[in-house]
Amino acid sequence: MSVQGAPPLPGAAIKQDLRLSMVAAERSGDMLAALLLQGMRKTWPDLNASGIGGPQMDAAGFTSRWSCDELSVRGLVEALWRYRHINGIRQSLIQELLASPPDLYVGVDASDFNLPVERLLRKQGVPTVQLVCPSIWAWRPERVQKIRDSVDHVLCIYPFEPALLAQHGIEGTFVGHPVADVIALQPDRLKARLALGLPADVTVVALLPGSRPSEVKGLALAFLQAARQMLTVRPGLQFVLPTHSPLKPMIEAAIAQAGMHGHVHLVMGRSHEVQAACDVALVASGTATLETALHKRPMVIAYRMQWLSWQIANRKRLLPWIGLPNILCNESLVPEFLQEQVQPEALAKAVLQWLDDPVAVANIQQRFTELHLQLRQDMPTLATHAIQKILAD
């Protein structure tokens, strides 16, 4: 079932007071879910939405029974360490939902958490939708059967995914990536710098070590040590690092350990403004790499996780890249440093190479513009249309 570009379905909005249960397990999912909620409220003005979310979902009228930060982990081993706590939340959620079934369940990414919930609810006749296709094209293809058993429909953010799902008998719709709708095709660097209090005429390097504690623990110090090395070569560089309150003490400790106190402009939130303001970014693998690409900024990607988690995940990896810009463009556009390759000297050298090669920067900006246009599809509207059809069937 594909509803890309479908017209509104006025007859499908039978219940104005639709009861929606939704789970997002990290900050990137919080943003995606908030946009979907905004789109759904245009069809269901009295939408009652609750579950597990973050501040952006709450601002969109969502009622969070638990915070998404309680579920945010990276890597299989880290998930095992916190399994009892996370599974306790999931079991409590399941009990509540089975006792009072919602009209619809939407799992936002986080398939390891969401698929078991969706499977149980689907058996009880609750329509289930997964926003963000589990990355069976990148790793863990064995999840296909779990997806088929658990969800009625997958809202796909990448254009090649519906056809891949269809090969396995799973219905999906390409709705575009919502970040592509939010970010301007031509980001205003000067405006972003003024908003952040940065000089207009300096070279700005964004440091984006991740939004989860495990990411920051693995990457922040290396990023800041790389920044220190860059300063020895280019003393005029300005470094900007966005974070949020739970991670601030960890970031500040890493800044002190790297001897970068007074050299890093620490920003609470506002990562998109940081990406717009910078000339180049050093960024943890994940959604932030796509956001940086959509801001048309060159970048260096790093990825480091607990050793055993990496060994397990790497054996199941199907693609030569881990960074979304390289995966989506199907070529090595930006350098990637994995695990033991994450060394300050190597990171610093790769970042400075971008600053010395304006032709390469211009070329990658063109590729990123093409990617932006492909992903810009008005996700909230298309996803809402797809959900209307699911509920009408």
Image (tube, rainbow, N blue to C red):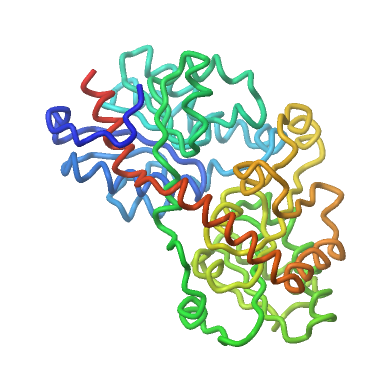
Reply above or below: 124 against 247.
above
Q: Quadrant of the C terminus?
A: top left
Q: Residue at x 34, y 20 (%)?
A: 98
Residue 118: name its quadrant: top left
Residue 299: where, in percent of width, then height? 68, 61
Q: Quadrant of residue 362?
A: bottom right
Image side of residue 318 versus residue 384, left or right: right
Which residue occupies the foreground of this view, 3 or 48?
3
Residue at 73% across, 86% down: 236
Question: Residue shown at 53%/62% (left/top)?
Answer: 295
> Is residue 100 visible to the viewer in this orientation of the structure?
no
Residue at 42%, 49% (x, y): give it: 376
Depth order, front residue of 99/36 = 36
Q: Position of residue 210 (x, y in %)?
A: 63, 55
Q: Is residue 199 left or right of residue 388?
A: right
Toward the viewer: 133 or 21?
Answer: 133
Q: Quadrant of the N terminus?
A: top left
User: Residue 369 at what x, y percent from top left?
Assistant: 52, 57
Residue 254 in the image, given as x and y percentages of width and height: 74, 67
